[in-house]
Amino acid sequence: MKRTYTLAELPDIASMILENINSKTLLLYGEMGVGKTTLVKELASKLGIKDSISSPTFSIVNEYHLAEGKLYHFDFYRIHDETELLDIGIEDYLETNYWKLIEWPEKISEKLLPYNRTTLKLTKNTDGSRTIQIMPMN
């Protein structure tokens, strides 16, 4: 599924994503500044999180509580070695049935990522709009 949108349409895009996926693991691909964290904020809001969402660039993971469960927001941009992830217990996080929204998943080995996941590829268009491609894998 592919859709082009403006930032004003982001709430509708987040709803569309949540209605059309069957995985709680979302891998967000896209260049710096394309809006990955902005999309995570909107998805978190749609899931009922009232807290202020921030990028976990330096902490690697931020944890948010839902009425039923949790949401883990990962940012692997600054990962230089997978041992950094193993040191924080990445396998324990990824094996849960909680929401896992992962920015920069290409920075880690495919073998660490859950099999049941949805890939979101974001691109910024010359007119300022964004295009999202949604690809489930399970």
Image (spheres, rainbow, N blue to C red):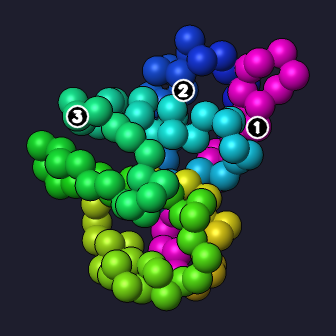
| Residue ID at (47%, 81%) | 84
Q: Position of residue 5 (x, y in %)?
A: 67, 20
In the rendered image, the vertical position of residue 48 relative to residue 59, given as above or below: above
Residue bearing mark 1 = 123
Q: Is residue 64 left or right of residue 19?
A: left
- The reply to whether discs 3 and 2 touch (Cβ–Cβ < 8 Å) is no
Q: Amino acid at mark 1?
A: Thr
SS category of the residue bearing label 1: strand
Amino acid identity at mark 2: Ile
Name which of mark 3 and mark 1 comes first in the sequence.
Answer: 3
* Position of residue 35 measured from the top left corner of the image (x, y, whole percent): 61, 34
29 or 132, which lies in front?
Answer: 29
Disc 2 element: helix
Between the residue at mark 3 and the residue at mark 1, the CA separation in whole angstroms equals 27 Å
Res 9 visible: yes
Q: x, y (%) of residue 54?
A: 38, 40
Q: Nearer the viewer, residue 53 or 99?
A: 53
Q: Which residue is mark 2?
A: 13
Q: Nearer the viewer, mark 2 or mark 1?
A: 1
Among all residues in the image, which is located at the extreme right? 126
**On residue 51, which mark appears?**
3
Quadrant that contains the N terminus: top right
Q: Which stretch is magenta?
A: 112-138
Residue that lies at the very extreme toward the front in this rendered image:
58
Count residues near mark 2 (Cα–Cα under 10 Å), then give few for <14, some for 14-19, many for 20+.
many
Q: Quadrant of residue 43?
A: top left
